[in-house]
């Protein structure tokens, strides 16, 4: 025979199985109902004992749900379904928003990485360009320095050769020859530039050294019919300038532009016979100013 305690436990388990998830309203209703059922059960067992009639009545009461309880259960299930749907919808919206946010962050991160990579590539390109420019400038500077050094060496070599030629061409003349050379250069090239004056002195000195003419300046200058200033006497009236003196000194020191010339002529101031003789008998070398030089 069941005890009162075991019967109450069965009733609680029965209602607990029927209402797994209920709203607060249903929970209060169920509590009231369970309390009432417990009171009725106690009264029934107290008045009638544990007879079969009491047991059958309690079992019938438990197995026959009241119409209001069925409606409440249906409403609870409907509310639970709606709540679950709302929760599911909210979760879905939150998931979509989270996915969108994650997508936006991912896109932003990718764009930032691309921008950083492009900026890095631009910096690398700029650095490489600067390095190339510096290397090119260095190369050009080295080439310029090398060229300057070569030009310097060439100039030094030319100067050395010129000095050697000057030393070879340098002549020492007597004071009388020196004075004659000053006067003939002043008379023949007094209006010429320095090179023109040195060229006239070169021709006089070339004749002295050639062996075909007298071996002194005076002998060369005063040979018959050789220089017009001697023929007309102007050699004795000219006033030698400081510039002419300097040019004669340079010629005596070996400065020579004559290419071995032994003759010179001013075509416009010479007689036609002399011009024909120069053109037919001599080798033309070059012209400087009004003077043409021959060999």
Image: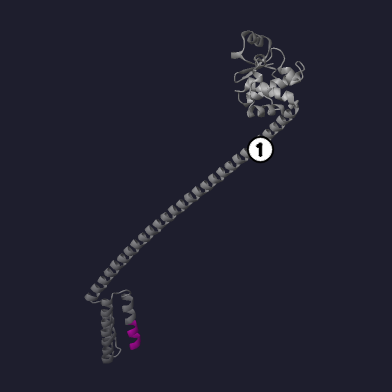
Residue beneath disc 1: 149
x, y percent for residue 242: 64, 29
Q: State which region is magenta.
A: 1-10
Q: Nearer the viewer, residue 242 or 277?
A: 242
Query: In this picture, is 240 found above or below 79?
Result: above
Q: Secondary structure at mark 1?
A: helix
Query: In this picture, is 184 found above or below 145?
Result: above
What residue is drawn where x is 27% and y is 68%? 78
x, y percent for residue 96: 36, 59
Question: How many numbered circles does the render carry?
Answer: 1
Rendering quarter of residue 159: top right
Q: Nearer the viewer, residue 115 or 227?
A: 227
Rendering quarter of residue 106: bottom left
**Is residue 101 located in the magenta-colored stretch of the structure?**
no
Q: Is residue 68 visible?
A: yes
Q: Residue furthest front?
A: 237
């Amino acid at each position: 025979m069941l005890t009162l305690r075991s019967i109450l436990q069965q009733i609680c388990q029965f209602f607990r199985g029927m209402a797994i998830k209920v709203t607060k309203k249903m929970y209060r209703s169920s509590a009231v109902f369970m309390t009432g059922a417990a009171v009725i059960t106690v009264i029934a067992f107290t008045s009638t004992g544990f007879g079969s009639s009491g047991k059958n009545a309690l079992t019938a009461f438990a197995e026959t749900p009241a119409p209001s309880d069925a409606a409440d259960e249906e409403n609870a299930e409907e509310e639970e379904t709606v709540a679950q749907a709302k929760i599911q919808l909210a979760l879905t919206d939150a998931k979509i928003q989270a996915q969108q946010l994650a997508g936006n962050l991912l896109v932003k991160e990718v764009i930032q990485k691309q921008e950083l990579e492009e900026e890095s590539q631009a910096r690398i390109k700029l650095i490489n360009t600067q390095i190339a420019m510096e290397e090119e400038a260095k190369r050009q500077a080295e080439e310029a320095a090398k060229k300057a050094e070569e030009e310097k060496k060439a100039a030094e070599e030319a100067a050395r050769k010129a000095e050697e030629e000057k030393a070879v061409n340098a002549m020492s003349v007597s004071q009388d020859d020196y004075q004659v050379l000053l006067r003939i250069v002043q008379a023949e090239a007094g209006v010429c530039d320095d090179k023109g004056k040195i060229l006239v002195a070169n021709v006089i000195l070339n004749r002295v050294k050639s062996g075909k003419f007298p071996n002194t300046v005076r002998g060369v200058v005063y040979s018959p019919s050789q220089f017009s200033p001697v023929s007309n006497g102007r050699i004795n009236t000219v006033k030698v300038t400081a510039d002419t003196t300097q040019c004669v000194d340079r010629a005596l020191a070996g400065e020579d532009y004559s290419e071995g010339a032994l003759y010179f002529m001013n075509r416009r101031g010479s007689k036609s016979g002399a011009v024909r003789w120069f053109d037919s008998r001599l080798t033309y070398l070059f012209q400087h100013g009004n003077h043409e030089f021959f060999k």
